[in-house]
Structures are given as C-alpha cells and as structure tokens.
Image: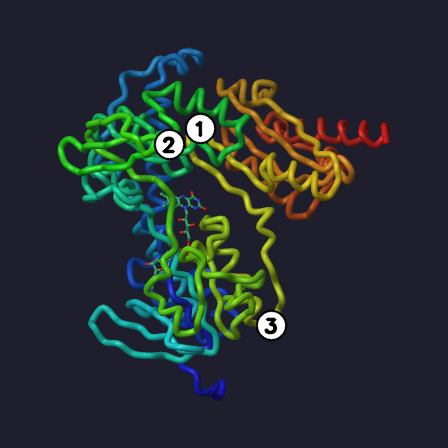
Amino acid sequence: MNEANFDFDLIVVGAGYGGFDAAKHAAEHGLKVAIIESREMGGTCVNRGCVPSKALLAASGRVRELANAEHLSGFGIHAAPVRFERQKIADHANKLVATIRSNLTKALERAGVTIIRGEGRLEGSQRVGVREASGIDRVLSSKDVILATGSDPFVPPGIETDGRTVFTSDEAVNLEWLPRWIAIIGSGYIGLEFADIYTALGCEVTMIEALDRVMPTFDPDLTKLAARQLIDGRDIDARAGLLASKIIPGCPVHIQLSDVNTRELKEELEVDAVLVATGRVPTSKRLNLDSLEVETNRGFVPIDDSMRVLVKGQPLPHLWAVGDVTGKLMLAHTAAAQGTVAVENILGNYRTIDYRSIPAATFTHPEISSVGLSELEAKELAAKEGFSLGSVRSYFKANSKALAELESDGLMKLLFRKDTGEVLGAHIYGLHAADLIQEVANAVGRRQSVVDLSCEVHTHPTLSEVVEVAYKQAAQQFKKAKSVN
Ligand SMILES: Cc1cc2nc3c(=O)[nH]c(=O)nc-3n(C[C@H](O)[C@H](O)[C@H](O)COP(=O)(O)OP(=O)(O)OC[C@H]3O[C@@H](n4cnc5c(N)ncnc54)[C@H](O)[C@@H]3O)c2cc1C
C-alpha cells in the first residue's frame, strides 16, 4: 500500500498511560494518529490504579496520623478523636480520577489525535479492526500500529469474585464500604497499599501470602524493618506459606487455606470481605495476534529493545507494543517511557529503554522504593563478571529531618561495584522513600560512580541526606578496596 493511502500514520490500541504518551508524542511530531479505547480513557492507572489508590492513601494517611495520639503527643499536640466520612474519602478519589481522565482526553484532542471508542484487534499487517460500541465494525489501515492494551487483575483458580464481598483492586478503589474484617490475598505492593488504607480506616486485616515470607518481592533486610511497622504494628494478622485455595463470596465470605506444597486443607476463615491482590495478567487474548503469528509468553507480547513486536525472535515490521502487555516492570512510568521510545523509533530516531534505571515505589506510610538490581541479582552479576559487590546502609535515625518529624524508622541499602564504584541498585524504606529514590535512579541511569556522587552537596536538613550518607560510606568502601588492591 502506498503511504498516502493509509487511513492513519499510527493507530494505538489502548488509551492507558502507554498508549496516551505514544499517541500524543506521535501527533506532536506531525503524524496522523488514532487511538482506540474500549473502556474509560486513561486505562488502569487513571481509573483503577495509581490515581484513585494514591488519593485514598492520602486521605487515610491523614486519618492515621491524626489518630496516632502517641506520635502527636511527642510534639506536644493533643487532637480530638478523629472522625472521617468514608463517602467523602471515596468522592475525593472519584473526583481526582474524573479530572485527570478529562485532562488527558483533552490533551489528546488538542494534539489532534482521533479518539475511537471501541475494541481494537489486528487484521493482519498494518490493518486494525475496530468494533465500536454502536456495533459498527470496520477495518482501518495504518502505516504503524502500537499495542498498548495493558493488564487486568489476576484471580487464581478456586477464587470466585462478586465485586462486592470478594473483589480486586478494580472495585477496591471505589471504597464502597468498610468491612469490619477483610482478608487481603497477596502481600505485593497493591496488597500492602490497601492494607495501609483499610487499617487506617479502622478495619481488621488478615493478609495471606502463598510464598514463604510476607512481602516476598522486597529486599529481605528492608522487609524486616518495614514489616515490623507496616504489618506487626497494625491490626494485621499476616500468614505466609498458605494458599487461598477456595473463596466463596457472601455474608460471611468463606475462605479455605491450604498448604502451598501438599494442598492439604489447613484452616477455614469467615470474614466480611476479601481483596484479591495476586498480581496482574496481560490483556492480549482478544487482539487476534494469530493474524500475524505472534506467539505470546503467558499472554505477554514479546518485544525487542526498541519496542518492536517479535515473531520467533525476529522483529515484525510496523508492529510495536508498550506497557503492561509487554510484562516489563509493570508500572505507569515504564508504559509512558516505552510509548515515547516506540514513537521515536517510528520517527527513525533509534532509542531504547534502560529498564535498570526505572524506579518503583509502594506508597504505604512510610513508603518503600527501589531501583536497579536486587541484592541477589547484584551478587549473581558480581559472580558472573568477577567483581566484588559493595553494600552500605544508611539509617533514617541518623537524619535530622526524620528525627524532627519523629519518623526515624527507615533504612536505605545501596549496592555498588567495588571495582568501578558504579551504583547498581538501591532499596529504601522510610519517610518519602518514593521521592528519595529518584536521585539514585538518575545515578543508575548515568552509570555514575559513588565517588562522584559522594561529592554532591545535599540540602540540610532534608531526607536526601540519607542518600548522601550512603554515597559517602560507599565512596569510603570503594577507596579502601582500591588501596588494598
Ligand atoms: C491498584 C493499582 C495501583 C497502582 N499504582 C501504581 C503506582 O502508584 N505507580 C505506578 O507507576 N503504577 C501503578 N500501577 C500500575 C499501573 O496502573 C500500570 O502499570 C499502568 O496503568 C500500565 O499502563 P498501560 O498503558 O500499559 O495499560 P493500562 O493502563 O492497563 O491501559 C490499557 C488500556 O487499553 C484498553 N484496552 C485493552 N484492550 C483493548 C482493545 N482490544 N481495544 C481497545 N482498548 C483496549 C484498556 O481498556 C485500557 O484502558 C497500579 C496498578 C494498580 C492496579
């Protein structure tokens, strides 16, 4: 087909963060762009993820702070008993969702992107079928196509959801009611954030984790400290090594807990509600990937470093994929960055993503964040490449700002190469950890050495001095290692 005969230069399927950034960036660079969305504009992040959950965390975090009489009395403050209105907290989240969704839609319209409401699918090379809400089905041609269809909550077999008593984060963000006793299945970041919200608002939580320790995806040393405050210090009963093998919705909800290995029934619980937070699965089943012989990996669309879709390891011309559907660090900022990179490649400017420098955060009170390699990954790399791994810890209890806030429980672990000083990763638990990690993420991205970083001056008194202390300790270790060799 002649270039001039295509309906569009670019069709993006899915208007979440990945699709949004790709479509806007392409339109701003002069391409004729359409975006197809089957649900609400903004995708998971705006409607069912980052945005409403952070709004709920902001409100419930304040309730927790004001209700913590012991903490407040440390400042000489005595507050009256705290009252809150659940519906108004929910409204705060809903209003924020509506505002951000509207801003995002307007930004696409302003950029000249054609918004098509319907379900998209591939119809062979450079062709996209779309079934609109009205039932009209048509096929459009496009020089390039980006798949940005995201992900949905994973509900394990044996668990039945009804959206009211047994639900996923899709419904939890609406905060329709506050169960007296809620079981949260999974202790990843979504489970932890909702445990933070529910306990702040007076609910009792039982947390069920199938793996052998709670918070299995977090640094083990950080977890010891974090779990003491975020789990043991709250109305949470956490159980690891147990599988929620059967859950039946109702009043009460029935839960069967089995041994992970033997599947032997261990315990039965009756609770008011269950939040299933057991991960997410890619939304790719209805994309008709077979029309281009694309084989997925458990539903994830395989891509190369420039976001081209792969078939049998080889890139397909004109087909790209970004965001959660590709399974790389399933976060909003990853999706957005991938969207921009895909478009840059379409425009002929070769670009790739440095996944190692993408930070991740859990917005509990206090927060948890990380960037780069885990300690285990760093040890494996050290063994493979034959260098010594450096590791230092910097404590919030030595930080003036954290002490002034009476929030000095916190730890930063910094991992670096002892031969070059290069920062490999960092893991932080403590006040504003989500903001602190960005500085290290930038250093990882630039492959900077702890020696250079240790010379950077940090504002006093700020939490950023926790990072400064880590860099200084690491630089000392590095210099010592050099003087020995
Ligand atoms: C509770 C929760 C909290 C989170 N908090 C954070 C956070 O704090 N920070 C962070 O970085 N990330 C967070 N995330 C993750 C973040 O939401 C996702 O990583 C991000 O939304 C992925 O963006 P995406 O564009 O790949 O996909 P999505 O946002 O899932 O968007 C995909 C879009 O494609 C549409 N679609 C699917 N199939 C089709 C089709 N065939 N045709 C047309 N449209 C289709 C969907 O309706 C959807 O709108 C959170 C997630 C959850 C669930």
Residue 167 — which label? none
- Residue named by callout 3: 348
Q: Residues within 10 Å of mark 2 (few under 14, many from 20)?
A: many
Q: Earlier in the sequence, mark 3 or mark 1?
A: 1
- Please name whichever residue, 352 or 461, is drawn nearer the observer in this view of the structure: 352
The disc placed on residue 209 is: 2
Spatial CA span between label 2 and label 3: 46 Å
Mark 3 surroundings: few (<14), some (14-19) or many (≥20) residues within 10 A? few
Looking at the rendering, in which quadrant would you find the C terminus? Answer: top right
Q: Tell me what residue is drawn at x 57 percent, y 33 percent.
A: 427
Q: Please determine whether, in this image, residue 379 is positioned above or below residue 396.
A: below
In the foreground, 393 or 267: 267
Depth check: 32 or 323 in front?
A: 323
User: Camera-side residue: 200 or 59?
Assistant: 200
- As drawn, the label of residue 213 is 1
What amino acid is labelled 3 in the image? Gly
Q: CA distance from mark 3 to mark 1?
A: 47 Å
Task: Kindly tell me whether residue 217 is visible in this rendering.
Answer: yes
Asked if the residue under mark 3 is in contact with the one under mark 2, i.e. CB atoms within 8 Å, the reply is: no
